[in-house]
Amino acid sequence: MNPEEICFLPARELVRRIRARELSAVEVMDAHIAQIERVNPAVNAIVTFLPELGREGARAVDAALARGDDPGPLAGLPVAHKDLIPTRGIRTTFGSPIFKDFVPDTDAIIVERLRKAGAITIGKTNTPEFGAGSQTFNPVFGATRNPYDLARTCGGSSGGAAAALACGLLPIADGSDMGGSLRNPASFCNVVGLRPSQVACRTGRAFPAGSTWL
Protein backbone atom coordinates (compact mmCIF):
# COMPACT_ATOMS: atom_id res chain seq x y z
CA MET A 1 0.00 0.00 0.00
CA ASN A 2 1.14 3.54 -0.60
CA PRO A 3 1.32 5.85 2.44
CA GLU A 4 -1.79 7.86 1.59
CA GLU A 5 -3.88 4.68 1.33
CA ILE A 6 -2.67 3.69 4.81
CA CYS A 7 -3.79 7.06 6.20
CA PHE A 8 -7.39 6.56 5.07
CA LEU A 9 -7.86 3.00 6.31
CA PRO A 10 -10.39 2.75 9.16
CA ALA A 11 -8.80 2.63 12.60
CA ARG A 12 -10.13 -0.88 13.20
CA GLU A 13 -8.54 -2.13 9.98
CA LEU A 14 -5.23 -0.48 10.82
CA VAL A 15 -5.15 -2.23 14.19
CA ARG A 16 -6.03 -5.56 12.58
CA ARG A 17 -3.21 -5.26 10.07
CA ILE A 18 -0.68 -4.16 12.70
CA ARG A 19 -1.59 -7.04 15.00
CA ALA A 20 -1.47 -9.50 12.08
CA ARG A 21 1.98 -8.09 11.14
CA GLU A 22 0.67 -7.16 7.68
CA LEU A 23 1.76 -3.59 8.40
CA SER A 24 4.27 -2.53 11.01
CA ALA A 25 3.41 0.19 13.49
CA VAL A 26 6.43 2.08 12.14
CA GLU A 27 5.01 1.95 8.61
CA VAL A 28 1.68 3.27 9.86
CA MET A 29 3.37 6.02 11.86
CA ASP A 30 5.63 7.07 8.98
CA ALA A 31 2.64 7.26 6.63
CA HIS A 32 0.81 9.60 9.01
CA ILE A 33 3.91 11.69 9.64
CA ALA A 34 4.30 12.18 5.88
CA GLN A 35 0.61 13.10 5.57
CA ILE A 36 0.93 15.67 8.36
CA GLU A 37 4.00 17.19 6.77
CA ARG A 38 2.23 17.38 3.41
CA VAL A 39 -1.26 18.55 4.41
CA ASN A 40 -1.13 20.19 7.83
CA PRO A 41 0.46 23.47 6.68
CA ALA A 42 -2.76 24.20 4.76
CA VAL A 43 -5.29 23.25 7.47
CA ASN A 44 -3.34 23.98 10.69
CA ALA A 45 -5.02 21.14 12.59
CA ILE A 46 -1.99 19.84 14.51
CA VAL A 47 -0.24 22.64 16.37
CA THR A 48 2.41 20.69 18.28
CA PHE A 49 3.98 17.93 16.17
CA LEU A 50 6.23 15.25 17.68
CA PRO A 51 7.28 12.83 14.93
CA GLU A 52 10.24 11.34 16.80
CA LEU A 53 8.07 10.59 19.83
CA GLY A 54 5.63 8.90 17.47
CA ARG A 55 8.33 6.77 15.85
CA GLU A 56 9.70 5.77 19.24
CA GLY A 57 6.25 4.60 20.33
CA ALA A 58 5.73 2.72 17.06
CA ARG A 59 9.02 0.86 17.47
CA ALA A 60 7.93 -0.14 20.97
CA VAL A 61 4.64 -1.57 19.64
CA ASP A 62 6.44 -3.55 16.94
CA ALA A 63 8.89 -4.91 19.53
CA ALA A 64 6.02 -5.95 21.82
CA LEU A 65 4.28 -7.81 19.00
CA ALA A 66 7.54 -9.52 18.05
CA ARG A 67 7.85 -10.79 21.65
CA GLY A 68 4.29 -12.08 21.57
CA ASP A 69 3.04 -9.43 24.00
CA ASP A 70 -0.33 -7.72 23.66
CA PRO A 71 0.22 -3.95 23.25
CA GLY A 72 -3.48 -3.15 23.59
CA PRO A 73 -6.67 -2.77 21.54
CA LEU A 74 -5.46 0.46 19.88
CA ALA A 75 -1.97 -0.90 19.19
CA GLY A 76 0.04 1.36 16.90
CA LEU A 77 -2.61 4.00 16.19
CA PRO A 78 -1.23 7.57 16.08
CA VAL A 79 -3.24 10.01 18.19
CA ALA A 80 -3.00 13.74 18.88
CA HIS A 81 -4.61 15.24 21.95
CA LYS A 82 -6.70 18.39 22.01
CA ASP A 83 -4.60 21.30 23.29
CA LEU A 84 -6.90 21.66 26.30
CA ILE A 85 -5.86 18.22 27.58
CA PRO A 86 -2.74 18.10 29.80
CA THR A 87 0.10 15.95 28.48
CA ARG A 88 3.14 15.25 30.62
CA GLY A 89 6.29 16.75 29.09
CA ILE A 90 4.40 18.09 26.05
CA ARG A 91 3.41 21.73 25.68
CA THR A 92 -0.26 22.38 26.46
CA THR A 93 -1.29 25.97 25.69
CA PHE A 94 -5.11 25.91 26.05
CA GLY A 95 -4.93 28.18 22.99
CA SER A 96 -3.91 31.10 25.23
CA PRO A 97 -0.80 33.32 25.26
CA ILE A 98 -0.88 32.97 29.05
CA PHE A 99 0.07 29.29 28.68
CA LYS A 100 1.97 29.36 25.38
CA ASP A 101 5.07 27.82 27.01
CA PHE A 102 3.32 25.67 29.63
CA VAL A 103 4.51 22.05 29.91
CA PRO A 104 2.46 19.93 32.36
CA ASP A 105 4.10 17.37 34.63
CA THR A 106 1.07 15.03 34.59
CA ASP A 107 -1.18 13.45 31.97
CA ALA A 108 -4.96 13.74 31.87
CA ILE A 109 -6.67 10.42 32.49
CA ILE A 110 -7.76 10.14 28.83
CA VAL A 111 -4.12 10.40 27.76
CA GLU A 112 -3.14 7.69 30.24
CA ARG A 113 -5.92 5.40 29.05
CA LEU A 114 -5.23 5.89 25.36
CA ARG A 115 -1.54 5.14 25.93
CA LYS A 116 -2.37 2.06 27.99
CA ALA A 117 -4.58 0.87 25.12
CA GLY A 118 -1.63 1.11 22.72
CA ALA A 119 -2.29 4.44 20.99
CA ILE A 120 0.81 6.55 20.32
CA THR A 121 0.93 10.29 20.98
CA ILE A 122 2.19 12.31 18.03
CA GLY A 123 1.15 15.85 19.03
CA LYS A 124 -1.63 18.25 19.99
CA THR A 125 -4.62 19.55 18.00
CA ASN A 126 -5.88 23.12 17.78
CA THR A 127 -8.70 24.62 19.85
CA PRO A 128 -10.15 28.09 20.49
CA GLU A 129 -8.71 29.84 23.53
CA PHE A 130 -9.76 27.83 26.61
CA GLY A 131 -12.16 25.93 24.34
CA ALA A 132 -14.59 28.84 24.31
CA GLY A 133 -16.31 29.01 20.95
CA SER A 134 -17.78 27.06 18.05
CA GLN A 135 -14.93 27.96 15.69
CA THR A 136 -11.27 27.02 16.08
CA PHE A 137 -8.82 29.91 16.23
CA ASN A 138 -6.65 31.41 18.94
CA PRO A 139 -3.87 34.01 19.40
CA VAL A 140 -1.15 31.36 19.74
CA PHE A 141 -1.63 29.22 16.62
CA GLY A 142 -4.22 31.03 14.49
CA ALA A 143 -7.15 29.36 12.72
CA THR A 144 -7.76 25.77 11.71
CA ARG A 145 -9.29 25.57 8.24
CA ASN A 146 -12.11 23.43 6.94
CA PRO A 147 -10.57 20.55 4.91
CA TYR A 148 -13.23 20.88 2.21
CA ASP A 149 -12.95 24.66 1.79
CA LEU A 150 -9.97 26.47 3.33
CA ALA A 151 -11.94 29.74 3.34
CA ARG A 152 -14.45 28.29 5.80
CA THR A 153 -14.43 27.25 9.44
CA CYS A 154 -13.92 23.69 10.67
CA GLY A 155 -16.20 24.38 13.65
CA GLY A 156 -15.14 24.01 17.25
CA SER A 157 -14.01 23.65 19.80
CA SER A 158 -12.45 20.30 18.83
CA GLY A 159 -11.88 21.63 15.32
CA GLY A 160 -8.24 20.62 15.10
CA ALA A 161 -9.18 17.03 15.92
CA ALA A 162 -12.00 16.90 13.37
CA ALA A 163 -9.94 18.49 10.58
CA ALA A 164 -7.01 16.14 11.30
CA LEU A 165 -9.27 13.11 10.96
CA ALA A 166 -10.86 14.38 7.75
CA CYS A 167 -7.43 14.91 6.19
CA GLY A 168 -6.06 11.50 7.18
CA LEU A 169 -3.52 13.06 9.54
CA LEU A 170 -4.75 10.76 12.32
CA PRO A 171 -6.95 7.65 12.53
CA ILE A 172 -8.32 8.68 15.96
CA ALA A 173 -8.29 11.86 18.02
CA ASP A 174 -9.67 13.01 21.34
CA GLY A 175 -11.54 16.13 22.32
CA SER A 176 -13.99 17.59 24.82
CA ASP A 177 -17.64 18.55 24.61
CA MET A 178 -19.80 20.52 27.02
CA GLY A 179 -22.12 22.02 24.41
CA GLY A 180 -21.34 20.52 21.03
CA SER A 181 -17.56 20.86 20.87
CA LEU A 182 -17.13 17.35 19.45
CA ARG A 183 -20.34 17.14 17.47
CA ASN A 184 -20.22 20.57 15.84
CA PRO A 185 -16.76 20.22 14.19
CA ALA A 186 -17.51 16.61 13.28
CA SER A 187 -20.54 17.78 11.29
CA PHE A 188 -18.52 20.53 9.62
CA CYS A 189 -15.68 18.15 8.65
CA ASN A 190 -17.67 15.02 7.69
CA VAL A 191 -16.37 12.79 10.49
CA VAL A 192 -17.97 11.26 13.61
CA GLY A 193 -17.84 12.95 17.02
CA LEU A 194 -19.10 10.85 19.92
CA ARG A 195 -19.84 12.28 23.35
CA PRO A 196 -20.43 9.49 25.88
CA SER A 197 -23.04 9.82 28.59
CA GLN A 198 -21.93 10.97 32.02
CA VAL A 199 -23.54 7.90 33.59
CA ALA A 200 -21.35 5.63 31.47
CA CYS A 201 -18.34 7.71 32.42
CA ARG A 202 -19.03 7.51 36.15
CA THR A 203 -19.43 3.75 36.01
CA GLY A 204 -16.12 3.36 34.21
CA ARG A 205 -17.54 2.08 30.94
CA ALA A 206 -16.33 5.09 28.98
CA PHE A 207 -13.96 8.01 29.24
CA PRO A 208 -14.34 11.02 31.57
CA ALA A 209 -17.33 13.27 30.96
CA GLY A 210 -16.94 15.28 27.78
CA SER A 211 -13.90 13.39 26.52
CA THR A 212 -13.99 10.91 23.70
CA TRP A 213 -12.52 9.94 20.33
CA LEU A 214 -13.68 11.28 17.02
Image (cartoon, rainbow, N blue to C red):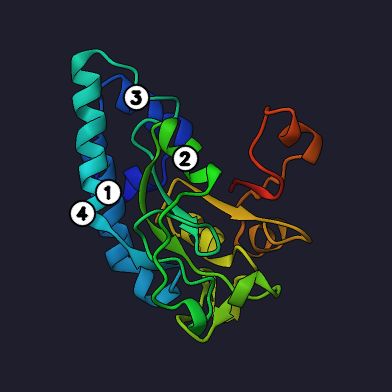
Mark 1 is on which residue type?
Answer: Gly
Give the side of residue 143 with respect to residue 14, left or right. Answer: right
In this view of the protein, which residue sits in the foreground, 11 or 196? Answer: 196
- The answer to whether residue 146 is visible is yes
Residue at mark 1: 54
User: Which quarter of the rendering shows the N terminus?
Assistant: top left
Instruction: Residue 8 in the image: state x and y as whole percent.
Output: 41, 46
Is 96 situated above or below 165? below
Is 135 situated above or below 35? below
Q: CA distance from mark 1 to mark 2?
A: 16 Å
Q: Secondary structure at mark 1?
A: helix
Q: Residues within 10 Å of mark 1 (few under 14, many from 20)?
A: many
Residue at mark 2: 112
Mark 4 is on which residue type?
Answer: Glu
Label disc, if present, on residue 52 of the rendered structure: 4
Q: Secondary structure at mark 3?
A: loop
Residue, far front: 105
In this view of the protein, which residue sits in the foreground, 207 or 14? Answer: 207
Q: CA distance from mark 3 to mark 2?
A: 14 Å
